[in-house]
Image (cartoon, grey):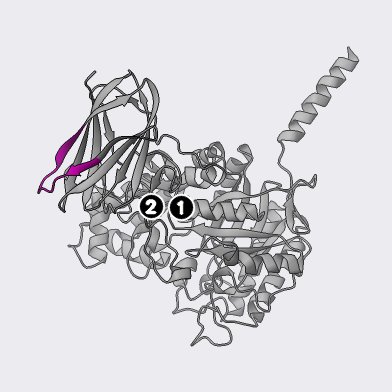
């Protein structure tokens, strides 16, 4: 009996131990857990939550949060402005978001922090040189940590907006250029150090905290601020290095265990003069946008990793097409580099969740851009509160194609159904619901991603920026609200559909299209066999339907591929009519 009880206790302890999160640390060039097992971080950045950037809200021009808030205040007053920001913080990131990230396959979260949720700006301190601590930021972080722990997600704390602001790209750190920057003010630097010490004291014993990302994307010209304002050519970087050393020293006074992540100048990539590392539990972060996904694009960070025997981590990337996403993840993981995508949600379709706009908020944007009349205070208030409510996961559009590109496609070249559809007599298949998969598997498009850093051209991806984030060009249907069409079709492109047919038979397929040019042509393949060739789509001012007769489909799964021999037309849908 005692032996059975002891065995049960040992099993219970083993189960608890297996489920408990472990502190992460560095071992040579790898991040490992306490048992020395490598951990590859696959994460998401919570951009837009504690720190808004204008482009995420479709605000044109200067998009610093303090300016956005000021413009909102002018429309609805301070009390209602505070109500909007309270709702924004409450709704944007909740436990359901972390539950979803875990279910989808992510294992970590990077949270961008705005210092002003934790402490007062130096110019507002009642006593100069003393730090007033604000409970709200700590409570928000505590809640996020609790949700991460429930889901066994690692949390990386990222100081995105430091006191005074750390860069000349003002939106990123909500910097006010009329006030001293982080680099112009000793008081701001002391407050930054004190904030990190306070955070480290609070979370020193939390294994679910993976690391402290101590200063995001410094972009500052120390030696030549006139000609190199973002520090891309900076060779010394001594003020940046010194501040990070000082932050590290403050953290280590209260926390010996957590990884410290450092970022270079020039948006996180210029490490000249910063290395070698000064701590034995340190990770180098770099950021990657809009360049080729080849080894050459990361060779500098691989060389740095090998030279200094320190792990590297891609702390921020994204803002591109699904093709680029899959290429990037495959490149990174092949080279044992973890990643955090940017961001989880915003207004736009190239992230896992799309926040939708509304008529009231659209009026605000039109007013701010000089293209519309000033909305009434009530209209503006309702539009903003609707926007805050629509940041909730259940009110966003979940971009399944983005998730597939990040988590499945890097490891599989197979195409799978966009959504399972049973096809019978009279079934209608939207043209935009082609399969999930990469370019050349689920579709083929001639321009698939934005590589402008590498090739000087920003072209590529979904030109319509609607519905999906692949290479296929999709626009909103001008005649049917809430529907979408394939547009900008070019010769040689194609789309594939995996469908579940209910009954074997011959079918008539009706392609609904709108041709702007003469003699558009398509060829239809069924299960890789040519079923119809050179089907002509006559030009016309309106939408038309063209028949493809005697298409044999069998019960169960079938694949259709529509090959575009020419361009110059849009495609709306495919209707199936059984002819037997």
**Would you say residue 119 is visible in this rendering?**
no
Q: Which residues are magenta?
A: 534-548
Q: Quadrant of the N terminus?
A: top right
31 sits to left or right of 133: right
Depth check, front residue: 505 or 449: 505
Depth check, front residue: 9 or 131: 9
The x, y position of residue 187, in whole percent, is 60, 76
Depth check, front residue: 251 or 296: 296
Q: Residue at x 86, y 15 (%)?
A: 4
Tag 1 and tag 2, C-beta contact below 8 Å: yes
First in residue order: circle 1 vs circle 2? 1
The x, y position of residue 151, in whole percent, is 60, 38
282 sits to left or right of 457: right
> Can you identify the residue that label 1 sits on?
323
Residue 235 lies in the magenta-colored region:
no
Considering only vertical position in the picture, is 223 above or below 304?
below
Depth check, front residue: 61 or 138: 61
Q: Residue at x 37, y 40 (%)?
A: 395
User: Predominant secondary structure in magenta?
Assistant: strand
Q: Secondary structure at mark 1?
A: helix
Q: Residue furthest right?
A: 2
Disc number for residue 471: 2
The x, y position of residue 559, in whole percent, is 38, 32
Q: CA distance from mark 1 to mark 2?
A: 7 Å
């Amino acid at each position: 009996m005692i032996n059975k009880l002891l065995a049960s206790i040992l099993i219970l302890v083993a189960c608890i131990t297996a489920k408990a999160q472990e502190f992460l640390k560095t071992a040579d060039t790898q991040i490992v857990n306490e048992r020395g097992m490598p951990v590859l971080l696959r994460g998401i950045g919570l951009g837009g939550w504690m720190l808004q950037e204008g482009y995420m809200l479709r605000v044109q021009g200067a998009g610093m949060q303090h300016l956005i808030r000021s413009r909102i205040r002018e429309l609805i007053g301070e009390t209602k402005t505070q109500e909007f920001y309270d709702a924004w913080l409450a709704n944007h990131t909740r436990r359901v978001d972390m539950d979803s990230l875990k279910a989808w396959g992510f294992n970590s979260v990077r949270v961008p922090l705005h210092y002003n949720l934790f402490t007062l700006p130096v110019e507002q301190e009642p006593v100069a040189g003393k730090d007033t601590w604000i409970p709200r930021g700590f409570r928000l972080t505590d809640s996020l940590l609790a949700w991460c722990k429930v889901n066994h997600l690692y949390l990386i704390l990222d100081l995105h907006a430091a006191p005074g602001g750390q860069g000349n790209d003002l939106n990123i750190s909500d910097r006010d250029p009329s006030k001293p920057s982080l680099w112009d003010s000793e008081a701001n630097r002391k407050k930054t150090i004190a904030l990190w010490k306070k955070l480290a004291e609070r979370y020193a014993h939390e294994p679910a905290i993976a690391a402290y990302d101590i200063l995001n994307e410094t972009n500052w010209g120390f030696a030549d601020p006139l000609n190199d304002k973002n520090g891309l050519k900076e060779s010394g970087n001594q003020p940046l290095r010194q501040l990070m050393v000082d932050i590290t020293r403050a953290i280590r006074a209260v926390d010996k265990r957590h990884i410290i992540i450092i970022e270079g100048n020039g948006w996180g990539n210029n490490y000249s003069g910063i290395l070698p590392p000064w701590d034995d539990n340190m990770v180098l972060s770099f950021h990657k946008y809009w360049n080729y996904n080849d080894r050459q694009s990361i060779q500098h960070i691989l060389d740095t990793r090998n030279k200094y025997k320190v792990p590297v981590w891609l702390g921020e990337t994204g803002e591109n097409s699904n093709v680029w996403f899959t290429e990037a993840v495959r490149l990174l993981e092949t080279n044992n580099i973890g990643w955090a995508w940017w961001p989880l949600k915003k207004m736009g379709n190239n992230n896992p969740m799309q926040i939708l706009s509304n008529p009231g908020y659209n009026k605000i944007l039109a007013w701010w851009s000089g293209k519309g009349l000033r909305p009434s205070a009530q209209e503006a208030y309702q539009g903003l509160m609707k926007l805050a409510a629509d940041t909730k996961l259940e009110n966003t559009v979940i971009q399944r194609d983005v998730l597939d590109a990040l988590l499945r496609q890097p490891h599989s070249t197979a195409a799978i159904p966009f959504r399972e559809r049973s096809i019978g007599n009279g079934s209608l298949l939207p043209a935009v619901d082609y399969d999930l998969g990469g370019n050349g598997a689920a579709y083929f498009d001639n321009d698939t991603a934005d590589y402008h850093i590498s090739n000087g051209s920003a072209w590529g991806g979904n030109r319509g920026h609607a519905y999906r984030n692949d290479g296929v060009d999709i626009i909103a249907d001008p005649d049917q609200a809430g529907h979408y069409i394939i547009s900008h079709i070019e010769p040689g492109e194609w789309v594939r559909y995996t469908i579940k047919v209910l009954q074997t038979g011959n079918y008539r397929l009706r392609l609904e299209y709108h041709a702007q040019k003469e003699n558009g042509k398509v060829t239809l393949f069924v299960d890789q066999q040519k079923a119809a060739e050179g089907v002509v789509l006559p030009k016309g001012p309106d939408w038309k339907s063209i028949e493809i007769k005697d298409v044999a489909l069998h019960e169960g799964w079938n694949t259709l591929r529509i090959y575009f021999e020419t361009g110059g037309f849009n495609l709306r849908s495919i209707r199936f009519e059984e002819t037997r």
